[in-house]
Image (cartoon, grey):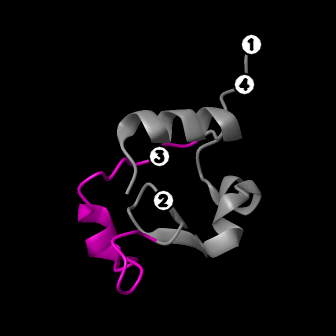
Amino acid sequence: MDDAETMKKFKAELKAPYSFIPDPEGKVVALYDVKMPVMSLANRYSFVIGEDRKVLKVQSGKDALDPTEAIAACPIKAKKKT
């Protein structure tokens, strides 16, 4: 349940080519039911959402810390320079 600045830094550190969604109020966490039991923290999850809004890939826990699979599943490709 990170704020926009935290997500911006995390994205930069990973050099991720896709967007991160800040969720300081936990609204997305509630929608995807990924809150840790008893604690007011979210478990780390990565969801790759396609242009048609379908979930293409889900990673959780320690797997979500390595963005390699999420990047590979991401439909957004860098535009070629001409």
> What residue is pinned by disc 1?
82
Give the overall secondary structure of the magenta segment: loop
Magenta highlight range: 18-42
On the question of residue 15 being in view, the answer is no
Q: Tell me residue 82's x, y (percent).
A: 74, 13
Element at badge 1? loop
Mark toward the start of the polypeptide (3 vs 2): 3
> What residue is pinned by disc 2?
50
Position above or below: 16 against 58:
above
Mark toward the start of the polypeptide (1 vs 2): 2
How far apart are labels 4 and 3 at the CA level? 23 Å
How far apart are labels 3 and 1 at the CA level? 28 Å
**Amino acid type, label 3:** Phe
Marks 3 & 2, CB-CB < 8 Å contact: no
Q: Identify which residue is drawn at 42% across, 69% down.
A: 42
Based on the picture, tell me whether residue 45 belongs to the magenta stretch. no
Crowd tier of the residue under label 3, counting other residues whose Cα lies within 10 Å: few below 14, some 14–19, many 20 or above: some
> What residue is pinned by disc 4?
80
Marks 4 & 3, CB-CB < 8 Å contact: no
Residue lying furthest front: 39
